[in-house]
Amino acid sequence: MPRLVLFVALWALACRWAPAQEVGEVGYPVSSLRIPGTDPFGLMWPCIEPFIFESPLNTTYVTADMVAFRRDWQALQTFATLDTPTNAVLGTHDLPFVYQPGLRLLVGTRLNDWFALEASYLGLLDWNEIRTVRNETVNVLGTEGNLFSPFSNFGDPPLLGFDYNNFASIRVVSTFHNAELNLRQRLDTPPSVLQATAIWGLRYINVQDQFSYRTQSLEPTPGGTNTAIDVQTKNDLFGVQVGASVEFQVERRCWLLFEAKGMLLANSSSQRTAYTVGPLAGPDSTANGTRAQGRAMLGGDLAATLEWKVTPAIVARFGYQGIFLDGLALGSDNFLRNLANMTTDPNELSDEGHLAYQGPFAGVTVTW
């Protein structure tokens, strides 16, 4: 019985004390363990005061984020084998597309209680990756090098000047830029710790990709062969997007935001190929081919963000984002393994590539 009385007394004291801790320093409610006791879960917790969603943003807001994105999801392409057609030693999956720094800027303003207009830019992302293989073993012709190229289906059968290489390298230089103009519409939801928003907007994405292929062979003797192929592709994507966001206020100063967008874009893509060949000591000769075309494509954008209101005007942000694009013209996909097609103009264009840009971000929002 004494324990029961003590428990009831402590419970009553906690119920009396919780509402008294409403405001702390800088005008905010102090952190507490109070869990929302109403919507969206319909739970009722004794002595826990529920609260209704309050946005961290005022009428106008500006966001600056530092991002660190990887470039993933590219299809595997093999560009050199050793000794046999199946022993791959150089391909696109050997390129280490590490996290690269970039920047996101967003400016938004509330038009009224239901609509907000936002403009944003994400970019300054630049990848420059290279891989090289060398081989000095003696081949069946008595010279150094047993690396085989895609032009002969990797030595089936071998082609002098393209196979029996002692050096091979591939390189990708790629950039990404993204701009959006969105109208956010707050959806009518019951009073709770949750707010849902519909997103309607326009989107522009620019993806440029340069693929370089280099080989050296001592065949045919005595001059040997230098081969260099550079494929430059450009993708200008413009179209519409729709999406939604769900924001949970998990604490008086803390929010969780989940956002998803789907894109329907028109891609104006092009490629230019330069094929250079000559003896190791020179001179070289170059042939060029180009092609441009358009197509429709799809994309997706997913993001999760944790927001913490540091002061009434400053909101810290941490999160993770992934952007997925299909229907791209990529440099390695437009590497033509047919020599006759490579040196013609107009050339061929492959726009069936896909990429994912993903990584963490951290930044701050200033609102007033």
Image (cartoon, rainbow, N blue to C red):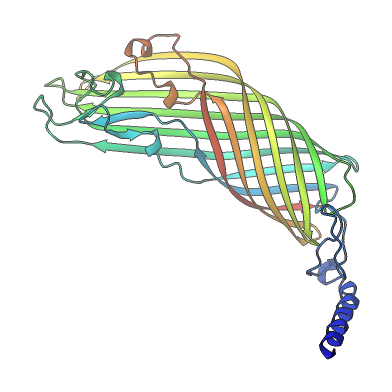
- Residue ranking furthest to the front: 1
* Residue 321 location, quadrant: top right
Q: Position of residue 3 (x, y in %)?
A: 81, 88
Expressed as whole percent of the image width and height from the top left, the position of residue 120 reads 70, 38
Residue that protrudes farthest toward the bottom in the picture: 2
264 vs 144, nearest the viewer: 264
Residue 124 to residue 308: above or below: above
On the image, which quarter does residue 35 sit in? bottom right
In depth, the one of 364 and 99 nearer the eye is 99
At 69% from the left and 39% from the top, the residue drawn is: 260
Horizontal relation, residue 227 to residue 42: left or right:
left
| Residue displayed at 19% across by 30% down | 146
| Residue at 13% from the left image edge and 29% from the top image edge | 139
Question: Residue drawn at (48%, 29%), measured in percent from left and top?
Answer: 209
Q: Is residue 265 left or right of residue 171?
A: right
Residue 15, position as x, y percentages in the image: 89, 75
Task: Tell me the quarter of the image containing the N terminus.
Answer: bottom right
Instruction: Give the number of marks.
Output: 0
| Residue 206: image location, x then y, percent | 59, 29
User: Which residue is at the far left?
Assistant: 142
